Image: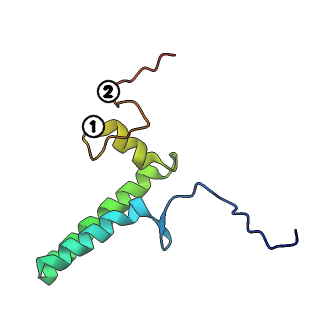
Amino acid sequence: MQTDTYIPRRLDDQWKLGFWDADVAAPILFCFILGYLSGSKMSFAFCMTIGIFVSRWLSRIKADKHSAFAMHWIYWALPPTPLSAMRATPPSHLRRMVG
């Protein structure tokens, strides 16, 4: 009974990459890879500028909203395809739940 037990303080934290949330860091990482594959310094700088702009824009949108705002937006805004369809939830075109 005297074993050291670890109890986590927060269970539902967002995934992090360093200090940043994963959904905010994803545009920068994607543009970094795209700019690196382009092969020139000018296109790399252009891709990184776009990635930083999109990341800052996304972080400002998420600032006063739910922590899973990006996932909720993806569910309601994107069309249901086999890649974006979730099995445990109803289709996004059903806006009114009865029952």
Residue ID at (42%, 34%): 89
Q: Quadrant of the N terminus?
A: bottom right
What type is the residue that disc 2 sits on? His
Are the residues tagged 1 and 2 within 8 Å (C-beta)?
A: yes
* Cα–Cα span, label 1 and label 2: 9 Å
Residue 94, image x, y percentages: 36, 24
- Image quadrant assignment for residue 9: bottom right
For disc 2, the neighbor class at 10 Å (few under 14, some 14 to 19, many from 20) is few
Q: Nearer the viewer, residue 29 or 62?
A: 29
Label count reads 2
What residue sits right under mark 2 in the picture? 93
Q: Nearer the viewer, residue 9 or 19?
A: 9
Judged left or right of residue 35, residue 53 is right
What residue sits right under mark 1 in the picture? 80
Residue 74, image x, y percentages: 34, 44
Q: Tell me if residue 77 comes above or below residue 62 in the rendering.
A: above
Which of the two discs, 1 and 2, labels the residue nearer the N terminus? 1
Residue 46, image x, y percentages: 19, 72
| Residue at the front extreme, as displayed | 1
**The residue tagged with tag 1: helix, strand or loop?**
loop
